[in-house]
Amino acid sequence: MPLTPRCLRPALLLVLLAPALAACDRAPAPAPAGAAPTPAAAAAERIRADVAALADDRMQGRRTATPGFDRAAEYVAARMRAIGLQPAGDDGTYFQRVPLLSATRVAAGARFEVVRRDRTITLRFGDQFLPAPDFSAAERSVRAPAVFVGQGVVAPERGHDDFAGLDLHGKVAVLFGGAPAAFDHDQRAIHGAVPEKLRALAARGAIGAVFVDSAQDEARAPWPRQAAAWEQPQLRLRDGDGRAIDGYPQLRVVATVSAAAADLLFDGSGHTAAELADAVRAGKAAGFVLPVSLSLATRSAIAPVDSRNVVGRLPGSDRALAGESVVLSAHLDHLGSGAAVDGDGVYNGALDNALGVAIVLEAARNARAAAASKRPLLFLASTAEEQGLLGAQWFALHPRGRTIADINIDMPMLLAPTRDAVAIGAGHSTLEAALQQAAGAMQLPLSADPFPEESVFTRSDQYAFVRAGVPALALDSGTLAAASSAGKPADARTLPLLAQREFLRRCYHQPCDDIGQPIQYGDAARLATLAARLGLAVGNGAQPPQWRAGDAFGNRFGVAPGMETAAPR
């Protein structure tokens, strides 16, 4: 789940984190000899064992469509079987096939030329531009006039249209990412999504797209890091005819230009790239025809591949509701193996997201031990989340019955003891009431999303369900520090958030996201209990969850069949 780390002074960080990290390193007091572990300790140990297995080097970082991922999927299926879940995949198995296309950039033959009347400027592959892999043809090219289209955002609810007065037919669109800063967090998340932009460009007749990085973009994702991954294959879902779903074949070439080279696109336009980047963030940049044509070419190695979701079911007790399911999900895949850091080239993904899968498995165990839900509960370990929520998207498009809600867990950063939980996106639907019921029964405080500006709600598997019209939320790590071992209250917010920020700064999508992290397994067991209670509350609800009236996501993606819209709060 991508977040933007915020840099902190290392010395200050270590001072503030010292009490929390010391508490993390202390093992729980052992039970007296011969005594059975408490239920909470046993749950924590099961989660620890599952994380250790899934984040083991033998799983090779669980990259989608690799032997390491397949081993992890087999492990999860065996755990589901041991817990007593029924198989809910294809043909009586725990596995749902997910057909994919893999596309990898080929440097030879890639081209980006800015064609002016007096000269042609050739950009360097990797250093100044990167083409997106093409899922429609191994070789593609285009030469066409260029048009600047701001951020490619059309938001009628805000009276904003970056395409107003522009003709894109047969043109290459040049644009910045994101959405205007004046938009609220939800609107920025919706309109800033790259697939939404590509869809809008293709619908308006563009035949190419060039995204321009700003300095702000590269503060979050440095260009060298982007360029270093150019050889990694990318994935899309594959339809029954072998074509990419969301592949946008009308756009013959899609590329990104680095911030350092951005002014080469705008030279002669009367504007600098930095000036335009500031203007689009302020919502004040009008599009215009650029005084250049762009000559672009890309080569890609394309191949069909398959991966698997892992799905288990607890059947419901009410036959009349057997067709309505509540999904508890976590993505199983991670980044695989890659460039070594300090001698380690396995990107184990312990927090991201072996921990989430382990929590969902423990939630399944809790739910099975409880009184049966009226509706079936499905437990999903999805593939290809890191490639664009693809496994969850496939499941949402090919559900087991009608999905009425998704409860997702992705990368809970349980790195310092907490006494609360966070539920991202709960307020968009009546899932919030069920959540309050479940947390209230546990006397568990619920805290607000600590990073609302990061739009996490749209950046993990729950969003694949949202786009299919299904209310969803993401359960996440808390932010309120637990009391110290001496019984004194700790700083209410500082230590957990600092631990999370330090993880994001150092280990997010890095090899050090491994079993050596100071994971709070007791907190993980508590989150599993909350997930199970919430799933049961929704499964036993008189009505399926409903979108709040006027909610941005409900309005954008419609209402799932048979669902109504709740009155505003």
Image: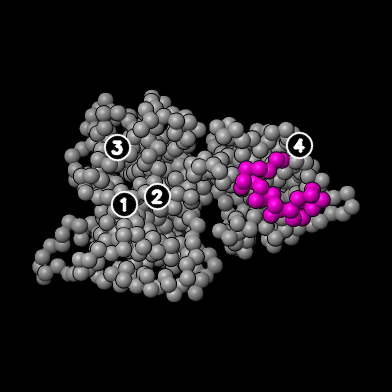
Q: CA distance from mark 3 to mark 2?
A: 17 Å
Residue where numbered disc 3 is placed? 433
Q: Residues within 10 Å of mark 3 (few under 14, many from 20)?
A: some
Q: Residue at position x 79%, y 53% from top?
A: 267
Q: Mark 4 or mark 3: which comes first in sequence? A: 4
The quarter holding residue 24 reads bottom left
Q: Nearer the viewer, mark 2 or mark 4?
A: 2
Q: Amino acid under label 1? A: Ala
Residue 54 percent location from the top left of the image: 37, 59
Furthest toward the left, the residue is: 34
Q: Amino acid under label 3? A: Ala
Quadrant in which the C terminus appears: top left
Q: CA distance from mark 1 to mark 2?
A: 10 Å
Q: Amino acid under label 4? A: Gly
Instruction: Tell me which colouring the rendered structure shows.
Output: one colour
Q: Are marks 1 and 2 in contact (CB under 8 Å)?
A: no
Q: Residue at position x 62%, y 53% from top?
A: 104
Q: Which mark is residue 421?
A: 1
Q: Residue at position x 20%, y 69% from top?
A: 486
Residue where numbered disc 2 is placed? 449
Q: Amino acid under label 2? A: Asp
Secondary element at tag 4: loop
Q: Mark 1 or mark 3: which comes first in sequence? A: 1
Secondary element at tag 3: helix
Q: Which residues are magenta?
A: 263-287
Residue where numbered disc 4 is placed? 170
Secondary element at tag 1: strand
Q: Nearer the viewer, mark 4 or mark 3?
A: 3
Q: Mark 3 or mark 2: which comes first in sequence? A: 3
Secondary element at tag 2: loop
Q: Residues within 10 Å of mark 2 (few under 14, many from 20)?
A: many
